[in-house]
Amino acid sequence: MANTRKKISNANVYVNGASLLGKVSEATMPDITIKQIDHGPLGQHGVTSLPVGFDKLEMSLKWTSFYNDVIASMADGYNSISGQLRSSQETYDAGGGRSAEESFVYFFRGRPTNLPTGSFKQHENAEGETKVALDYIKLEIAGSTQFEIDVVNNVYIVNGVDKLATYRANLGI
């Protein structure tokens, strides 16, 4: 399997259980940035960085037009939306043929932080982009959880290992 290639070229977004097929032209999932603090105590010859948590998680959805059903859920920044970005990841073997397909699913939950009012140009689609501040993300490939981050509940799982289990126990939660 060393000479295989994986490819994702399309996806569909679901928000609050509704398909947005054809309504989203681009979805950008968040970069996961681990915050670091400098640690340079007396007696240590240099400074190192230590992890202290995550930077905020934010995704964006670029709309192909304006849809009444979507505007209603994106206009309320006080209530969370939940959704999925679903795709099919293809594997190609060394001979160039497709040898496998597997599900590729991002789960997310958060609050919209803006409601676009649009960009209008002659003979072009009216587009807008919504940003969503996320509290929760999870990536599953072929039904296997690759990572899961639940900011509010202090959950960080990587490849089945709960990285914050001891931290939660130490806090008594």
Image: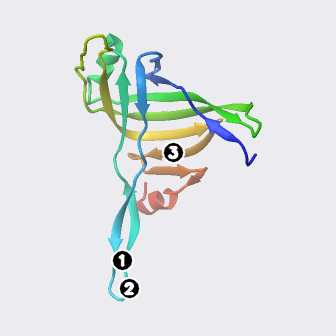
Label disc, if present, on residue 44 of the rendered structure: 2
The amino acid at mark 3 is Glu
Residue lying at 73% horizontally and 49% vertically, measured from the top left: 2
How far is disc 2 from disc 3 in space, using C-alphas?
35 Å
Which amino acid, mark 1?
Answer: Val
* x, y percent for residue 69: 35, 13
Looking at the picture, tell me which residue is in the foreground, 79 or 141: 141
137 or 88, which is in the foreground? 88
Where residue 66 sits, quadrant-wise, is top left
Residue 73 x %, y %: 32, 21
Mark 1 packing: few (<14 Cα in 10 Å), some, or many (20+)? few
Please give the name of the residue rendered at 56% of the width and 51% of the height, measured from the top-left corner.
158
Q: Is residue 143 left or right of residue 43?
A: right
Relative to 121, say whether 101 is above or below: below
> Circle 3 is placed at which residue position?
148
In the figure, is residue 92 to the left or right of 112?
Answer: right
Residue at 25% over, 24% down: 116
Cα distance, mark 1 to mark 3?
30 Å
**Residue 42 point in image, percent of width and height:** 32, 86
Quadrant of the frame with the N terminus: top right
| Quadrant occupied by the C terminus | bottom left
Residue contact between numbered discs 1 and 2, judged by CB atoms under 8 Å = yes
